[in-house]
Image (tube, coloured by chain):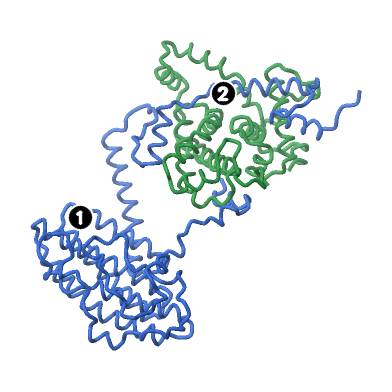
Protein backbone atom coordinates (compact mmCIF):
# COMPACT_ATOMS: atom_id res chain seq x y z
CA UNK A 1 0.00 0.00 0.00
CA UNK A 2 1.53 3.35 -0.98
CA UNK A 3 2.26 5.65 1.91
CA UNK A 4 0.40 8.97 1.91
CA UNK A 5 2.36 12.08 1.02
CA UNK A 6 3.92 13.85 4.03
CA UNK A 7 1.81 16.93 3.47
CA UNK A 8 -1.36 14.91 3.61
CA UNK A 9 -0.18 13.29 6.83
CA UNK A 10 0.60 16.72 8.27
CA UNK A 11 -2.86 17.97 7.35
CA UNK A 12 -4.55 14.93 8.80
CA UNK A 13 -2.62 15.22 12.02
CA UNK A 14 -3.42 18.92 12.19
CA UNK A 15 -7.10 18.17 11.70
CA UNK A 16 -6.89 15.54 14.41
CA UNK A 17 -5.33 17.99 16.84
CA UNK A 18 -8.02 20.54 16.01
CA UNK A 19 -10.69 17.97 16.80
CA UNK A 20 -11.89 17.61 13.23
CA UNK A 21 -12.99 14.14 12.12
CA UNK A 22 -10.13 12.18 10.57
CA UNK A 23 -9.67 8.53 9.80
CA UNK A 24 -7.19 7.16 12.31
CA UNK A 25 -4.59 5.29 10.28
CA UNK A 26 -1.73 3.20 11.62
CA UNK A 27 0.58 6.09 11.09
CA UNK A 28 -1.61 8.57 12.91
CA UNK A 29 -2.51 6.33 15.83
CA UNK A 30 0.74 6.65 17.85
CA UNK A 31 0.85 10.38 17.16
CA UNK A 32 -2.71 10.79 18.37
CA UNK A 33 -1.87 8.74 21.43
CA UNK A 34 1.15 10.92 22.19
CA UNK A 35 -0.95 14.04 21.69
CA UNK A 36 -3.62 12.71 24.04
CA UNK A 37 -1.05 11.86 26.68
CA UNK A 38 0.46 15.32 26.42
CA UNK A 39 -2.94 16.99 26.54
CA UNK A 40 -3.96 14.98 29.59
CA UNK A 41 -0.78 15.89 31.40
CA UNK A 42 -1.12 19.55 30.56
CA UNK A 43 -4.74 19.54 31.72
CA UNK A 44 -3.52 18.59 35.18
CA UNK A 45 -1.82 21.97 35.48
CA UNK A 46 -4.52 24.02 37.14
CA UNK A 47 -4.13 27.61 38.19
CA UNK A 48 -4.80 28.11 41.89
CA UNK A 49 -7.93 30.31 42.37
CA UNK A 50 -6.10 32.32 45.02
CA UNK A 51 -3.34 33.08 42.55
CA UNK A 52 -5.89 34.05 39.92
CA UNK A 53 -7.46 36.48 42.40
CA UNK A 54 -4.08 38.03 43.08
CA UNK A 55 -3.37 38.44 39.38
CA UNK A 56 -6.70 40.12 38.79
CA UNK A 57 -6.25 42.31 41.82
CA UNK A 58 -2.89 43.41 40.51
CA UNK A 59 -4.31 44.24 37.10
CA UNK A 60 -7.42 46.00 38.33
CA UNK A 61 -6.06 47.82 41.33
CA UNK A 62 -2.32 47.48 41.11
CA UNK A 63 -2.21 46.68 44.80
CA UNK A 64 -1.81 42.95 45.09
CA UNK A 65 0.70 41.65 47.51
CA UNK A 66 3.75 40.33 45.78
CA UNK A 67 4.28 36.68 46.48
CA UNK A 68 8.00 36.18 46.73
CA UNK A 69 9.54 33.20 45.07
CA UNK A 70 11.16 30.80 47.48
CA UNK A 71 14.71 31.79 48.17
CA UNK A 72 17.56 29.80 49.51
CA UNK A 73 18.82 32.33 52.01
CA UNK A 74 17.81 35.77 53.12
CA UNK A 75 19.99 38.59 51.94
CA UNK A 76 21.92 39.97 54.86
CA UNK A 77 21.61 43.60 55.94
CA UNK A 78 24.67 44.70 54.04
CA UNK A 79 23.35 43.19 50.79
CA UNK A 80 20.02 44.89 51.32
CA UNK A 81 21.63 48.27 51.94
CA UNK A 82 23.79 47.86 48.87
CA UNK A 83 20.75 47.03 46.76
CA UNK A 84 18.78 49.99 48.07
CA UNK A 85 21.75 52.26 47.43
CA UNK A 86 22.08 50.89 43.90
CA UNK A 87 18.40 51.48 43.20
CA UNK A 88 18.55 55.01 44.60
CA UNK A 89 21.68 55.76 42.60
CA UNK A 90 20.18 54.36 39.42
CA UNK A 91 16.99 56.35 39.94
CA UNK A 92 18.99 59.51 40.56
CA UNK A 93 21.12 58.94 37.49
CA UNK A 94 18.05 58.43 35.35
CA UNK A 95 15.68 60.94 36.88
CA UNK A 96 17.95 63.90 37.52
CA UNK A 97 19.05 64.48 33.91
CA UNK A 98 15.56 63.70 32.68
CA UNK A 99 14.06 66.21 35.10
CA UNK A 100 16.49 68.89 34.05
CA UNK A 101 16.04 68.10 30.38
CA UNK A 102 12.28 68.20 30.66
CA UNK A 103 12.14 71.46 32.61
CA UNK A 104 12.21 73.54 29.43
CA UNK A 105 9.94 71.24 27.45
CA UNK A 106 6.95 72.75 25.69
CA UNK A 107 3.62 71.16 24.77
CA UNK A 108 4.05 68.89 21.80
CA UNK A 109 7.66 68.10 22.58
CA UNK A 110 8.75 64.60 23.52
CA UNK A 111 9.84 65.48 27.05
CA UNK A 112 6.69 67.40 27.88
CA UNK A 113 4.69 64.46 29.27
CA UNK A 114 7.64 63.71 31.53
CA UNK A 115 7.59 67.30 32.78
CA UNK A 116 3.89 67.06 33.60
CA UNK A 117 4.41 63.73 35.33
CA UNK A 118 7.13 65.21 37.53
CA UNK A 119 4.81 68.07 38.43
CA UNK A 120 2.12 65.64 39.46
CA UNK A 121 4.67 63.73 41.47
CA UNK A 122 5.71 66.88 43.29
CA UNK A 123 2.11 67.77 44.03
CA UNK A 124 1.43 64.28 45.29
CA UNK A 125 4.46 64.48 47.57
CA UNK A 126 3.18 67.59 49.36
CA UNK A 127 -0.50 66.78 49.54
CA UNK A 128 -0.22 66.18 53.26
CA UNK A 129 0.03 69.96 53.68
CA UNK A 130 -2.60 72.18 52.00
CA UNK A 131 -0.34 75.24 52.14
CA UNK A 132 2.55 73.43 50.47
CA UNK A 133 0.20 72.04 47.88
CA UNK A 134 -1.04 75.56 47.17
CA UNK A 135 2.53 76.75 46.66
CA UNK A 136 3.27 73.80 44.37
CA UNK A 137 0.15 74.35 42.32
CA UNK A 138 0.97 78.03 42.04
CA UNK A 139 4.34 77.04 40.60
CA UNK A 140 2.52 74.94 38.04
CA UNK A 141 0.41 77.93 36.98
CA UNK A 142 3.62 79.89 36.58
CA UNK A 143 5.05 77.12 34.41
CA UNK A 144 1.93 77.06 32.21
CA UNK A 145 2.07 80.84 31.73
CA UNK A 146 5.73 80.60 30.84
CA UNK A 147 5.02 77.85 28.32
CA UNK A 148 2.27 79.88 26.70
CA UNK A 149 4.60 82.84 26.40
CA UNK A 150 7.30 80.74 24.77
CA UNK A 151 4.86 79.09 22.40
CA UNK A 152 3.87 82.51 21.11
CA UNK A 153 7.47 83.52 20.90
CA UNK A 154 8.37 80.42 18.90
CA UNK A 155 5.19 80.71 16.83
CA UNK A 156 4.11 77.17 17.78
CA UNK A 157 0.49 78.10 17.18
CA UNK A 158 -0.77 74.56 16.88
CA UNK A 159 0.02 74.01 20.57
CA UNK A 160 -1.71 77.13 21.83
CA UNK A 161 -5.10 75.53 22.38
CA UNK A 162 -3.90 72.71 24.61
CA UNK A 163 -1.61 75.15 26.41
CA UNK A 164 -4.55 77.47 27.12
CA UNK A 165 -6.57 74.55 28.40
CA UNK A 166 -3.73 73.50 30.63
CA UNK A 167 -3.38 77.02 32.00
CA UNK A 168 -7.09 77.19 32.78
CA UNK A 169 -6.99 73.94 34.62
CA UNK A 170 -3.85 74.88 36.52
CA UNK A 171 -5.42 78.16 37.66
CA UNK A 172 -8.57 76.40 38.81
CA UNK A 173 -6.58 73.85 40.76
CA UNK A 174 -4.29 76.45 42.29
CA UNK A 175 -7.23 78.53 43.47
CA UNK A 176 -8.89 75.52 44.96
CA UNK A 177 -5.66 74.63 46.75
CA UNK A 178 -5.31 78.15 48.13
CA UNK A 179 -8.92 78.06 49.31
CA UNK A 180 -8.34 74.70 50.95
CA UNK A 181 -5.24 75.98 52.72
CA UNK A 182 -7.19 78.96 54.02
CA UNK A 183 -10.04 76.78 55.23
CA UNK A 184 -7.59 74.51 57.00
CA UNK A 185 -6.19 77.56 58.76
CA UNK A 186 -2.77 77.06 57.26
CA UNK A 187 -0.63 80.01 56.15
CA UNK A 188 -1.51 80.51 52.51
CA UNK A 189 -0.36 84.10 52.14
CA UNK A 190 2.77 83.25 50.18
CA UNK A 191 0.86 81.21 47.64
CA UNK A 192 -1.86 83.86 47.37
CA UNK A 193 0.63 86.61 46.66
CA UNK A 194 2.44 84.50 44.12
CA UNK A 195 -0.77 83.47 42.44
CA UNK A 196 -1.97 87.06 42.22
CA UNK A 197 1.23 88.21 40.58
CA UNK A 198 1.16 85.29 38.18
CA UNK A 199 -2.44 86.08 37.29
CA UNK A 200 -1.45 89.64 36.45
CA UNK A 201 1.44 88.42 34.33
CA UNK A 202 -0.75 85.89 32.61
CA UNK A 203 -3.15 88.62 31.46
CA UNK A 204 -0.32 90.17 29.52
CA UNK A 205 0.66 86.84 28.04
CA UNK A 206 -2.95 86.19 27.04
CA UNK A 207 -3.01 89.55 25.32
CA UNK A 208 0.04 88.47 23.32
CA UNK A 209 -1.65 85.20 22.45
CA UNK A 210 -4.72 87.06 21.21
CA UNK A 211 -2.58 89.36 19.09
CA UNK A 212 -0.63 86.43 17.73
CA UNK A 213 -3.81 84.61 16.81
CA UNK A 214 -5.19 87.66 15.11
CA UNK A 215 -2.05 88.32 13.11
CA UNK A 216 -1.36 84.68 12.54
CA UNK A 217 0.62 83.65 9.50
CA UNK A 218 -0.99 81.71 6.71
CA UNK A 219 -0.06 78.44 8.37
CA UNK A 220 -2.72 79.03 11.02
CA UNK A 221 -6.11 78.50 9.53
CA UNK A 222 -8.88 80.93 10.31
CA UNK A 223 -10.99 78.51 12.30
CA UNK A 224 -8.11 77.62 14.55
CA UNK A 225 -7.30 81.28 15.07
CA UNK A 226 -10.90 81.94 16.12
CA UNK A 227 -10.82 78.93 18.43
CA UNK A 228 -7.65 80.29 20.03
CA UNK A 229 -9.26 83.69 20.47
CA UNK A 230 -12.26 82.04 22.07
CA UNK A 231 -10.04 80.06 24.41
CA UNK A 232 -8.20 83.24 25.36
CA UNK A 233 -11.49 84.81 26.40
CA UNK A 234 -12.39 81.78 28.44
CA UNK A 235 -9.03 81.73 30.14
CA UNK A 236 -9.34 85.38 31.00
CA UNK A 237 -12.63 84.50 32.66
CA UNK A 238 -10.94 81.92 34.80
CA UNK A 239 -8.26 84.39 35.84
CA UNK A 240 -10.27 85.94 38.61
CA UNK A 241 -9.33 88.89 40.81
CA UNK A 242 -6.92 88.23 43.65
CA UNK A 243 -7.87 85.24 45.67
CA UNK A 244 -7.58 87.22 48.92
CA UNK A 245 -10.90 88.80 48.11
CA UNK A 246 -12.57 85.45 48.39
CA UNK A 247 -14.71 85.16 51.49
CA UNK A 248 -13.79 82.54 54.02
CA UNK A 249 -15.58 79.23 53.97
CA UNK A 250 -18.41 78.03 51.86
CA UNK A 251 -18.26 76.18 48.62
CA UNK A 252 -20.64 78.47 46.80
CA UNK A 253 -19.29 80.79 44.16
CA UNK A 254 -17.52 83.67 45.77
CA UNK A 255 -16.69 87.05 44.44
CA UNK A 256 -13.13 85.94 44.06
CA UNK A 257 -14.10 83.33 41.55
CA UNK A 258 -16.51 85.34 39.50
CA UNK A 259 -15.32 86.18 36.05
CA UNK A 260 -13.71 89.54 35.92
CA UNK A 261 -14.60 92.08 33.32
CA UNK A 262 -12.32 92.15 30.35
CA UNK A 263 -9.03 93.71 31.14
CA UNK A 264 -8.73 97.06 29.45
CA UNK A 265 -5.23 96.17 28.36
CA UNK A 266 -6.46 93.09 26.63
CA UNK A 267 -9.89 94.27 25.54
CA UNK A 268 -8.36 96.16 22.69
CA UNK A 269 -6.74 93.03 21.48
CA UNK A 270 -9.83 90.88 21.70
CA UNK A 271 -10.64 89.39 18.36
CA UNK A 272 -13.73 90.80 16.78
CA UNK A 273 -16.67 88.48 16.39
CA UNK A 274 -16.72 86.88 13.01
CA UNK A 275 -19.50 87.65 10.60
CA UNK A 276 -22.56 85.48 10.80
CA UNK A 277 -21.55 83.74 7.64
CA UNK A 278 -18.29 82.66 9.14
CA UNK A 279 -17.49 78.99 8.62
CA UNK A 280 -18.24 76.71 11.47
CA UNK A 281 -15.39 76.18 13.86
CA UNK A 282 -14.30 72.55 13.71
CA UNK A 283 -15.16 70.73 16.86
CA UNK A 284 -11.78 69.09 16.88
CA UNK A 285 -10.00 72.34 17.47
CA UNK A 286 -12.41 74.06 19.80
CA UNK A 287 -11.62 73.70 23.49
CA UNK A 288 -14.21 72.68 26.02
CA UNK A 289 -15.91 75.64 27.66
CA UNK A 290 -16.14 74.04 31.06
CA UNK A 291 -13.73 71.67 32.59
CA UNK A 292 -15.11 68.59 34.26
CA UNK A 293 -12.34 68.78 36.79
CA UNK A 294 -13.22 72.26 37.89
CA UNK A 295 -14.39 72.60 41.47
CA UNK A 296 -17.84 74.10 42.11
CA UNK A 297 -16.42 77.54 42.73
CA UNK A 298 -15.22 77.88 39.19
CA UNK A 299 -17.98 76.35 37.15
CA UNK A 300 -19.55 79.70 36.49
CA UNK A 301 -17.75 80.48 33.33
CA UNK A 302 -18.22 83.86 31.70
CA UNK A 303 -20.12 84.09 28.51
CA UNK A 304 -17.72 84.50 25.65
CA UNK A 305 -17.50 88.07 24.62
CA UNK A 306 -17.34 86.94 21.06
CA UNK A 307 -20.88 86.12 20.03
CA UNK A 308 -19.61 83.37 17.84
CA UNK A 309 -22.62 81.16 17.85
CA UNK A 310 -20.80 78.37 16.14
CA UNK A 311 -18.59 77.71 19.11
CA UNK A 312 -21.01 76.31 21.59
CA UNK A 313 -20.20 74.33 24.67
CA UNK A 314 -21.64 71.28 23.00
CA UNK A 315 -19.71 71.68 19.84
CA UNK A 316 -16.54 72.35 21.71
CA UNK A 317 -16.82 69.27 23.85
CA UNK A 318 -14.28 67.36 21.88
CA UNK A 319 -11.67 70.06 22.07
CA UNK A 320 -8.30 69.03 23.26
CA UNK A 321 -9.18 65.40 22.86
CA UNK A 322 -8.37 64.95 19.26
CA UNK A 323 -5.74 62.41 19.86
CA UNK A 324 -7.26 60.35 22.58
CA UNK A 325 -10.41 59.04 21.07
CA UNK A 326 -11.20 55.39 21.25
CA UNK A 327 -9.84 54.01 18.09
CA UNK A 328 -12.87 52.14 16.94
CA UNK A 329 -11.62 52.17 13.43
CA UNK A 330 -8.44 50.68 14.66
CA UNK A 331 -10.31 47.63 15.85
CA UNK A 332 -10.99 46.65 12.32
CA UNK A 333 -7.35 46.80 11.40
CA UNK A 334 -5.83 43.63 10.05
CA UNK A 335 -4.47 41.20 12.53
CA UNK A 336 -1.06 41.53 10.98
CA UNK A 337 -0.75 44.85 12.78
CA UNK A 338 -1.20 43.41 16.20
CA UNK A 339 2.11 41.73 16.82
CA UNK A 340 4.00 44.84 15.84
CA UNK A 341 3.56 46.13 19.38
CA UNK A 342 5.30 43.19 20.88
CA UNK A 343 9.02 43.50 20.96
CA UNK A 344 10.85 40.68 19.31
CA UNK A 345 12.25 38.30 21.81
CA UNK B 1 -6.22 35.90 8.36
CA UNK B 2 -7.17 34.61 11.74
CA UNK B 3 -10.69 34.30 12.97
CA UNK B 4 -13.99 33.75 11.34
CA UNK B 5 -14.64 37.05 9.66
CA UNK B 6 -17.82 38.18 8.01
CA UNK B 7 -19.93 37.91 11.14
CA UNK B 8 -21.70 40.86 12.63
CA UNK B 9 -20.74 40.05 16.21
CA UNK B 10 -17.33 38.39 16.14
CA UNK B 11 -16.81 35.89 18.90
CA UNK B 12 -13.45 34.35 19.63
CA UNK B 13 -13.13 30.64 20.14
CA UNK B 14 -12.91 31.24 23.88
CA UNK B 15 -16.20 33.12 23.85
CA UNK B 16 -14.99 36.71 23.98
CA UNK B 17 -16.64 39.40 21.89
CA UNK B 18 -15.40 42.65 20.40
CA UNK B 19 -17.36 44.43 23.16
CA UNK B 20 -15.31 42.55 25.74
CA UNK B 21 -12.17 43.76 24.03
CA UNK B 22 -13.30 47.38 24.07
CA UNK B 23 -14.32 47.15 27.73
CA UNK B 24 -11.07 45.42 28.69
CA UNK B 25 -9.15 48.23 27.05
CA UNK B 26 -10.92 50.55 29.48
CA UNK B 27 -10.01 48.14 32.27
CA UNK B 28 -13.60 47.46 33.18
CA UNK B 29 -13.30 44.80 35.87
CA UNK B 30 -15.92 42.45 34.39
CA UNK B 31 -14.30 42.45 30.97
CA UNK B 32 -10.77 42.11 32.33
CA UNK B 33 -11.94 39.16 34.42
CA UNK B 34 -13.52 37.56 31.34
CA UNK B 35 -10.31 37.92 29.37
CA UNK B 36 -8.32 36.52 32.27
CA UNK B 37 -10.68 33.59 32.74
CA UNK B 38 -10.51 32.85 29.02
CA UNK B 39 -6.74 32.84 28.66
CA UNK B 40 -4.99 32.55 32.04
CA UNK B 41 -5.42 28.76 32.37
CA UNK B 42 -3.85 28.23 28.94
CA UNK B 43 -1.06 30.67 29.73
CA UNK B 44 -0.38 28.87 32.98
CA UNK B 45 -0.25 25.48 31.25
CA UNK B 46 2.12 26.90 28.66
CA UNK B 47 4.46 28.32 31.29
CA UNK B 48 4.19 25.30 33.53
CA UNK B 49 5.22 22.98 30.74
CA UNK B 50 7.99 25.36 29.69
CA UNK B 51 9.61 26.10 33.07
CA UNK B 52 8.40 23.17 35.16
CA UNK B 53 8.01 25.23 38.32
CA UNK B 54 4.63 26.23 39.69
CA UNK B 55 5.76 29.45 41.39
CA UNK B 56 7.58 30.66 38.32
CA UNK B 57 4.71 29.68 36.04
CA UNK B 58 2.24 31.57 38.24
CA UNK B 59 4.49 34.57 38.30
CA UNK B 60 4.96 34.51 34.54
CA UNK B 61 1.22 34.15 34.00
CA UNK B 62 0.52 37.20 36.13
CA UNK B 63 3.28 39.23 34.51
CA UNK B 64 2.15 38.35 31.00
CA UNK B 65 -1.45 39.15 31.74
CA UNK B 66 -0.56 42.48 33.31
CA UNK B 67 1.64 43.39 30.33
CA UNK B 68 -1.13 42.38 27.96
CA UNK B 69 -3.79 44.46 29.71
CA UNK B 70 -1.46 47.45 29.79
CA UNK B 71 -0.67 47.04 26.09
CA UNK B 72 -4.27 46.28 25.13
CA UNK B 73 -5.06 49.84 23.98
CA UNK B 74 -2.38 49.34 21.34
CA UNK B 75 -3.75 46.00 20.16
CA UNK B 76 -5.37 46.71 16.83
CA UNK B 77 -6.41 43.24 15.73
CA UNK B 78 -9.83 41.65 15.92
CA UNK B 79 -10.92 39.73 18.99
CA UNK B 80 -10.12 36.43 17.25
CA UNK B 81 -6.46 37.43 17.10
CA UNK B 82 -6.22 38.20 20.81
CA UNK B 83 -5.08 34.69 21.77
CA UNK B 84 -2.19 34.73 19.34
CA UNK B 85 -1.19 38.19 20.50
CA UNK B 86 -1.27 37.13 24.16
CA UNK B 87 0.92 34.13 23.49
CA UNK B 88 3.35 36.29 21.60
CA UNK B 89 3.75 38.34 24.78
CA UNK B 90 3.96 35.11 26.77
CA UNK B 91 6.73 33.82 24.54
CA UNK B 92 8.60 37.08 24.91
CA UNK B 93 8.23 36.95 28.71
CA UNK B 94 9.42 33.36 28.72
CA UNK B 95 12.57 34.29 26.82
CA UNK B 96 13.19 37.13 29.26
CA UNK B 97 12.70 34.77 32.15
CA UNK B 98 15.16 32.28 30.68
CA UNK B 99 17.69 34.99 30.11
CA UNK B 100 17.41 36.04 33.75
CA UNK B 101 17.61 32.45 34.89
CA UNK B 102 20.75 31.87 32.90
CA UNK B 103 22.39 34.76 34.70
CA UNK B 104 21.36 33.64 38.16
CA UNK B 105 23.28 31.06 40.10
CA UNK B 106 22.55 27.36 39.72
CA UNK B 107 20.95 25.85 42.77
CA UNK B 108 21.59 22.30 43.86
CA UNK B 109 18.82 19.87 42.91
CA UNK B 110 18.62 18.71 46.49
CA UNK B 111 17.65 22.18 47.65
CA UNK B 112 14.99 22.38 44.97
CA UNK B 113 13.50 19.08 45.97
CA UNK B 114 13.51 19.91 49.67
CA UNK B 115 11.81 23.18 49.01
CA UNK B 116 9.31 21.62 46.62
CA UNK B 117 8.56 18.93 49.15
CA UNK B 118 7.77 21.59 51.73
CA UNK B 119 5.52 23.42 49.31
CA UNK B 120 3.75 20.23 48.25
CA UNK B 121 3.38 19.05 51.81
CA UNK B 122 5.24 15.81 51.10
CA UNK B 123 7.39 14.21 53.78
CA UNK B 124 10.07 12.81 51.58
CA UNK B 125 11.73 14.74 48.75
CA UNK B 126 12.62 11.48 47.03
CA UNK B 127 9.02 10.37 47.04
CA UNK B 128 8.00 13.72 45.64
CA UNK B 129 10.60 13.46 42.89
CA UNK B 130 9.32 10.04 41.86
CA UNK B 131 5.73 11.27 41.89
CA UNK B 132 6.73 14.15 39.71
CA UNK B 133 8.55 11.97 37.23
CA UNK B 134 5.50 9.78 36.94
CA UNK B 135 3.00 12.63 36.68
CA UNK B 136 5.07 14.65 34.23
CA UNK B 137 6.35 11.85 32.08
CA UNK B 138 5.18 13.32 28.79
CA UNK B 139 6.25 16.88 29.55
CA UNK B 140 9.63 15.54 30.66
CA UNK B 141 9.88 13.59 27.41
CA UNK B 142 9.43 16.82 25.50
CA UNK B 143 12.94 17.76 26.51
CA UNK B 144 14.10 15.32 23.85
CA UNK B 145 12.47 17.42 21.13
CA UNK B 146 14.10 20.27 19.29
CA UNK B 147 13.33 23.79 20.51
CA UNK B 148 11.10 24.47 17.53
CA UNK B 149 9.16 21.25 17.91
CA UNK B 150 8.67 21.79 21.60
CA UNK B 151 7.54 25.37 21.13
CA UNK B 152 5.06 24.44 18.42
CA UNK B 153 3.60 21.64 20.50
CA UNK B 154 3.29 23.83 23.58
CA UNK B 155 1.57 26.64 21.72
CA UNK B 156 -0.70 24.13 19.99
CA UNK B 157 -1.54 21.86 22.89
CA UNK B 158 -1.14 24.06 25.97
CA UNK B 159 -2.10 27.36 24.39
CA UNK B 160 -4.90 25.90 22.31
CA UNK B 161 -3.83 27.87 19.26
CA UNK B 162 -4.37 26.76 15.69
CA UNK B 163 -1.52 25.99 13.32
CA UNK B 164 -1.94 29.31 11.43
CA UNK B 165 -1.90 31.21 14.75
CA UNK B 166 1.27 29.42 15.83
CA UNK B 167 2.78 30.09 12.43
CA UNK B 168 2.11 33.79 12.81
CA UNK B 169 3.67 33.90 16.27
CA UNK B 170 6.79 32.02 15.18
CA UNK B 171 7.11 33.75 11.84
CA UNK B 172 6.90 30.47 9.94
CA UNK B 173 4.57 29.11 7.31
CA UNK B 174 1.58 27.04 8.35
CA UNK B 175 3.07 24.11 6.45
CA UNK B 176 6.28 24.35 8.47
CA UNK B 177 4.32 24.40 11.71
CA UNK B 178 2.34 21.34 10.66
CA UNK B 179 5.56 19.55 9.78
CA UNK B 180 7.13 20.49 13.11
CA UNK B 181 4.16 19.30 15.12
CA UNK B 182 4.13 16.07 13.16
CA UNK B 183 7.77 15.34 13.78
CA UNK B 184 7.54 16.52 17.36
CA UNK B 185 4.69 14.15 18.12
CA UNK B 186 6.45 11.33 16.29
CA UNK B 187 9.54 11.84 18.45
CA UNK B 188 7.39 12.06 21.55
CA UNK B 189 5.65 8.83 20.62
CA UNK B 190 9.00 7.10 20.22
CA UNK B 191 10.33 8.39 23.54
CA UNK B 192 7.15 7.25 25.25
CA UNK B 193 7.39 3.85 23.61
CA UNK B 194 4.53 4.43 21.20
CA UNK B 195 6.59 3.57 18.13
CA UNK B 196 5.72 5.42 15.01
CA UNK B 197 6.11 3.19 11.94
CA UNK B 198 7.27 5.94 9.65
CA UNK B 199 10.29 7.06 11.65
CA UNK B 200 13.71 5.47 11.17
CA UNK B 201 15.07 3.71 14.23
CA UNK B 202 18.68 4.80 13.86
CA UNK B 203 17.88 8.42 14.71
CA UNK B 204 15.43 8.39 17.60
CA UNK B 205 15.97 11.98 18.61
CA UNK B 206 16.47 15.11 16.66
CA UNK B 207 19.86 16.70 16.36
CA UNK B 208 21.32 17.14 19.87
CA UNK B 209 22.37 20.61 18.92
CA UNK B 210 19.22 22.69 18.60
CA UNK B 211 21.14 25.39 16.79
CA UNK B 212 22.19 22.95 14.08
CA UNK B 213 19.48 22.34 11.51
CA UNK B 214 18.92 19.10 9.74
CA UNK B 215 18.34 19.21 6.02
CA UNK B 216 14.64 18.53 6.62
CA UNK B 217 14.38 21.41 9.04
CA UNK B 218 16.18 23.64 6.63
CA UNK B 219 13.56 22.80 4.02
CA UNK B 220 10.80 23.82 6.42
CA UNK B 221 12.31 27.21 6.88
Work out whether A219 lies above or below B177. Answer: below
**Which residue has dot 2 on it?**
A43
**Which residue has dot 1 on it?**
A126
Residue B18: percent from left, percent from top: 55, 46
Chain B: what color? Answer: green
Residue B203: percent from left, percent from top: 76, 25
Residue A282: percent from left, percent from top: 47, 73
Side (left or right) of A83 relative to A185: right
Q: Which chain is disc 2 placed on?
A: A
Q: Secondary structure at mark 1?
A: loop
Side (left or right) of B25 relative to B212: left
User: Where's the C terminus of chain A, which quadrant?
Assistant: top right
Q: Quadrant of residue B62?
A: top left
Q: Quadrant of residue B83?
A: top right
Q: Which chain is disc 1 placed on?
A: A
Q: Secondary structure at mark 2?
A: helix
- Residue located 33% across and 72% down the image: A164
Side (left or right) of A136 relative to B17: left
- Residue located 47% across and 35% down the image: B60
Chain A: what color? Answer: blue
Q: Measure the C-alpha gap from mark 1 to mark 2.
A: 52 Å
Amino acid sequence: MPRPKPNKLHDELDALLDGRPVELTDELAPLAEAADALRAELAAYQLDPGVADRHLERVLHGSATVVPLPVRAQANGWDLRRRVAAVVLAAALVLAPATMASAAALPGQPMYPFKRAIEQLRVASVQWSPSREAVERTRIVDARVDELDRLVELQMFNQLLPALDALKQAVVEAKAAVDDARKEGEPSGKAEVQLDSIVVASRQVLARVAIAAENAPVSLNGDTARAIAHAVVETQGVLAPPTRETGPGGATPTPGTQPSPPDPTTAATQPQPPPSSAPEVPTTTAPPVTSTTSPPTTTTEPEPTTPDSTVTPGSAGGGGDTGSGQGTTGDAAPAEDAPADVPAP
Amino acid sequence: MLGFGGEREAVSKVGLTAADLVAARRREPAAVTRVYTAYAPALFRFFMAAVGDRHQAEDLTGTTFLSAIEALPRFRGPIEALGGWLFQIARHDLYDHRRRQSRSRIEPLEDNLNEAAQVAGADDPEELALDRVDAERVVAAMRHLSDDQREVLLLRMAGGLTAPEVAEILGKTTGAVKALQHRGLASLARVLGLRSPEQPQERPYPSPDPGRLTSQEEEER
